[in-house]
Image (cartoon, rainbow, N blue to C red):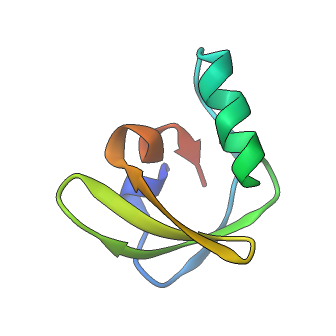
Amino acid sequence: MNLTEARIGEEYIIKGIVTQDGELDAFLFSLGCYSGEPVTVISRRRSNSVIALKDARYSIDNQLAKVIMV
């Protein structure tokens, strides 16, 4: 499942990043978004989600959330 399907408030472990774009993969890695890291969806709007990753919160769009597998 990807982050767009995750329940709000539940902690998940990132299983992988599914993208063919090396630049996007490097960007997510710089945020601390890689396999084995816990992530929680804090809230969700129509076109984006707020996630808690490490000690930070990020607003990511749904296209980005779809490549993060949990």
Q: Is residue 45 above or below residue 29?
A: below
Residue at image x 66%, y 36%?
Answer: 27
Q: Is residue 38 above or below residue 66?
A: below
Residue at image x 74%, y 71%?
Answer: 54
In this rendering, the count of numbered labels is 0
Quarter of image, res 29 = top right
Is residue 24 visible to us here?
yes
Q: Is residue 29 above or below residue 24?
A: below
Q: Is residue 60 left or right of residue 70?
A: left
Quarter of image, res 39 = bottom right
Quick one: quadrant of the C terminus?
Answer: bottom right
Residue 40: image x %, image y %? 56, 74
Q: Is residue 15 left or right of residue 40?
A: right
Residue 42: image x %, image y %? 44, 79
Residue at image x 73%, y 77%?
Answer: 55
Residue at image x 65%, y 73%?
Answer: 56
Q: Is residue 54 above or below residue 46?
A: below
Q: Is residue 49 left or right of residue 39?
A: left
Q: Nearer the viewer, residue 11 or 32?
A: 32
Residue 24: image x %, image y %? 60, 28
Is residue 33 visible to us here?
no
Residue 34: image x %, image y %? 76, 47
Q: Nearer the viewer, residue 5 or 19?
A: 19
Q: Is residue 13 left or right of residue 62?
A: right
